[in-house]
Image: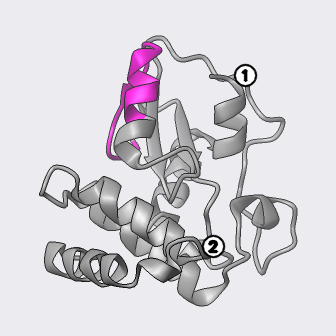
Amino acid sequence: MVVQQEAQFLARWLEDKREFLGSYPFDILYSRLSDALVDGVLDEDESNDLADLFLRLSSNENATVEAVVAGKASSSLPITRPEPVIVFPEQVFVVTGVFDFGNRKQVTACIQERGGRVSSSISGLTNYLVVGNQGSDDWMHSSFGRKIEAAIDHGVHVVIESHWHAHL
């Protein structure tokens, strides 16, 4: 978990080091920090998104959920096969991980605009767990690993962000 003071400090540090902002990973960090702090409050989802991003960047900068799904990582995500057609109206979604699409608020808003409902946790009512593309080889040990395990236990469709995005 990233606390607000840490996020603000890092954002100020990056602003002072503008010469790095056109380079990876500084550009991604600055963009995500700016989005998270735009309202002056770092909420729990934003904190978790930042923590997942920091873990991914610090452990393996090339780690993606697609690499894990393709079996090119240490363990494979249990993605629903065949990949389901995603229907939005009246369906319940849970999102986890770090998204290329944007922060969790943006992902949630996109689902809600299409008539879907978003929950913060997996239950028997959940239809889809959407896992952000910016995942890690070590998914079982990350904060989103517990949601994936819960989704499996409840028979929820586990889909990666790129598949979800293709249905927008």
| Residue drawn at (22%, 52%) of the image | 38
Q: Amino acid at mark 1?
A: Val
Q: Is residue 64 visible?
A: yes
Residue 48 point in image, percent of width and height: 34, 65
The x and y percentages for residue 23 are 60, 76
The mark closer to the camera, 1 or 2, is: 2
Residue at 52% x, 30% y: name it: 127
Side (left or right) of 122 relative to 135: left
Q: Earlier in the sequence, mark 1 or mark 2?
A: 1
**Which residue ends up furthest to the front in the rendered image?**
19
The foreground one among 154 and 15 is: 15
Q: Residues within 10 Å of mark 1 (few under 14, many from 20)?
A: few
Q: Which mark is residue 102?
A: none
Which numbered disc covers residue 136? Answer: 2
Image quadrant holding the C terminus, namely top right
The image position of residue 149, as x and y in percent, is 53, 59
Residue at x 62%, y 79% (from the top left corner): 138
* Magenta residue check for 121: yes
Q: How many marks?
A: 2
The residue singled out by tag 1 in the image is: 85
Front residue of 19/40: it is: 19
Label 2 element class: loop
Task: Classify 77 as above or below 122.
Answer: below
Label 1 secondary element: loop
Count neighbours of disc 2 (C-alpha within 10 A) and say few if under 14, some if 14 to 19, many if 20 or more: many
Residue 59, x across and y down, in percent: 60, 88
Q: Nearer the viewer, residue 6 or 151?
A: 6
Residue 164 lies, with reference to residue 22, above or below; the image says: above
Residue extent of the magenta highlight: 108-122
Whole-angstrom CA distance, mark 1 to mark 2, is 25 Å
Q: Quadrant of residue 134?
A: bottom right
Query: Can you say whether 6 is above or below 166 in the image?
Result: below
